[in-house]
Amino acid sequence: GENVEQHPSTLSVQEGDSAVIKCTYSDSASNYFPWYKQELGKRPQLIIDIRSNVGEKKDQRIAVTLNKTAKHFSLHITETQPEDSAVYFCAALTYSGGSNYKLTFGKGTLLTVNP
Amino acid sequence: GAVVSQHPSRVICKSGTSVKIECRSLDFQATTMFWYRQFPKKSLMLMATSNEGSKATYEQGVEKDKFLINHASLTLSTLTVTSAHPEDSSFYICSAWTRGSNQPQHFGDGTRLSIL
């Protein structure tokens, strides 16, 4: 099955700096890669996603890049703000036939943005 | 749109109690619902996938007799933790998917289960 590795596990940056979180996946059949932000005790919230036919996607201060050949994708947050502090999860989606699919999550990165 | 309601948000009960958690899709019909378990400072671990009207598919290592899942309608799935013990204490999150959605899953708010 799919295996998603995420690094680093913790990341501390100064407000205004950039933050980069990297993930690798093992199943070349995975074709959709979402990123979630989760605050303590809350639901994961989709912040950006990318499909396997795209190399890069940007939404204001957030961008995601995908290298299919190397099977890795990264989240880039620029001009970080204290409210960006949270746990970020990457995930990879794999179809298992028909309408059945599965999201495999990375272990998460605790991002702390210091004022 | 695409709101998923999960209830209750917090449960504290004695060891040996069975606990039922409900997951409802409020404004769409959920073809598939997923149940996750999340330990403190850990990732979301998929427990099972349920399609309306059929038996749930459990992930390896998840006891189907311990975690009973029912998906009787397109808007409701329930997870029952039977004879819960302290090691079952965790954050349980459901999510729902509908065909044509621009997101793979819409998550509920989660249920914090604490077994004394």
Image (spheres, coloured by chain):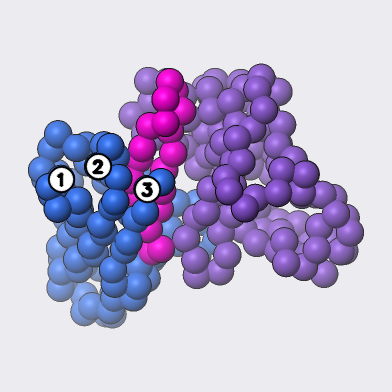
Chain colours: A blue, B purple
Q: Residue at x 73, y 67 (%)?
A: B87
Q: Range of the magenta residues?
A: A91-108
Q: Chain of mark 1?
A: A
Say what amino acid the circle numbered 1 marks.
Lys
Q: Main secondary structure of the magenta part?
A: strand
Dot placed on the residue nearer the N-terminal end, 1 or 3: 3
Q: Residue B33 sits in which quadrant?
A: top right
Measuring from the top left, give residue B24's x and y in whole percent: 63, 32
Amino acid at dot 2:
Ser
B116 and B9: which one is in front? B116
Q: Are marks 2 and 3 on the same chain?
A: yes
Residue type marked 3: Glu
Spatial CA distance of label 2 from label 3 is: 9 Å
User: Element at badge 1?
Assistant: loop
Question: Residue A52 has which mark?
Answer: none
- How far apart are the alpha carbons under marks 1 and 3? 15 Å
B108 displayed left or right of B84: left
x then y, percent, for residue B54: 65, 22
Question: Which numbered dot is residue A28?
Answer: 2
First along the sequence among labels 2 and 3: 3
Q: Which mark is residue A68?
A: 1
Residue A112 visible, this orientation: no
Confirm or deny contact between disc 2 and disc 3 (CB under 8 A): no
**Residue position marked by numbered label 3 in the rendering:** A2
